[in-house]
Each structure stands twice: as C-alpha cells, then as structure tokens.
Image (tube, grey):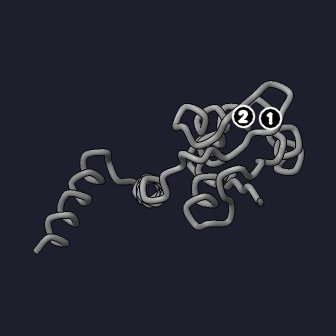
Amino acid sequence: MLITVDPSSAQPLAGQVAGSVRNAVASGQVAPGDKLPSARNVAASLGINLHTVLRGYQQLRDEGLVELRRGRAAVITSTADAFRLRLAAAAEEYANAALQAGASDEDAVAAVRHALLSARE
C-alpha cells in the first residue's frame, strides 16, 4: 500500500496520512486484516517525522479503522465500514478543495447544504 502526502497542502500531514489509508480502504486497495507499512518506513519514505505518521495512525485507531499494538504492525480492522469511509474521503477531498479555494467554513458548509438540497429535487 502506498501512502502519499502533499507538503504544499493546507491539510496537516498526519491528516493526509490518515486520509491516504482511508482512501485505500474505501477503494478496496486494502482489506480487513491487511497490515499497514510501519510508521518508521512511511516516515522515512515520505521524509516526514515519525510522530507525524503515528498521529495519522492514531486518528485511524480512534475511528476504529485500524488496530494498533506496540511493536506490531497496524492492521486494518474487520469493522471498517466502506460507505462511511467513502463519505469521509469525499468530505475530506471537498474540505481540502474548499480550503485551497479560500472559502470560509460557512461558505463551504452552505455549498454542501445547497448541493444536498439540489440532489434531493
């Protein structure tokens, strides 16, 4: 599994690490039981701090997507909900686009509300 980050993005690197894993799960690249690369290897390959990668992995643990055990690999859990992950990935992508476009939080949320209303019509 390839974890990627964009250093020029407004999104924190730890969030990008977590988002990359979420996207891989949502797209079916990884499945429950698959092991994530070690945080040390990810940090070295991306040229970022080990603790940044660990924060990303901890976000995934807090969401119930991975199981972390000290000294062992992070493993994708069997409780990963594909729909929830796809929705989270889409929301994250939208949030990044809104931030890069310079939209305020209020404008971004208003645009989502408008899109939801339009989709229901």
Could you say which is closer to the camera, residue 25 or residue 79? 79
| Residue type, label 1 | Asn
Q: Secondary structure at mark 2?
A: helix
Q: The C terminus appears in which quarter of the rendering?
A: bottom left
Please tell me whether residue 54 is drawn above or below residue 94 in the rendered image. above
Q: Residue at x 60, y 58 (%)?
A: 25
Distance from the alpha carbon under mark 1 to that under mark 2: 5 Å
User: In the displayed image of the protein, which residue is found farthest to the left?
Assistant: 121
As drawn, is 45 to the left or to the right of 12? right
Q: How many neighbours does mark 2 have within 10 angstroms: few (below 14), some (14-19), or many (20 or more)? A: some
**What x and y, as percent, mark residue 55?**
66, 32
Q: Secondary structure at mark 1?
A: loop
As drawn, is 53 to the left or to the right of 102? right
Q: The N terminus appears in which quarter of the rendering?
A: bottom right
Q: Residue at x 87, y 38 (%)?
A: 40
Could you say which is closer to the camera, residue 47 or residue 36? 36
**How many numbered badges does the structure rendering display?**
2
Quadrant in which residue 110 is drawn: bottom left
**What x and y, as percent, mark residue 84?**
43, 53
Q: Cβ–Cβ below 8 Å for labels 1 and 2?
A: yes
Q: How many neighbours does mark 1 have within 10 angstroms: few (below 14), some (14-19), or many (20 or more)? A: some
Query: Residue tagged by mark 2?
Result: 52
| Residue type, label 2 | Thr
User: In the displayed image of the protein, which residue is found farthest to the top?
Assistant: 70
As drawn, is 117 to the left or to the right of 93? left
Quadrant in which residue 67 is drawn: top right
**Label at residue 49:** 1
Please tell me whether residue 10 is drawn above or below residue 74 in the rendered image. below
Q: Residue at x 80, y 24 (%)?
A: 70
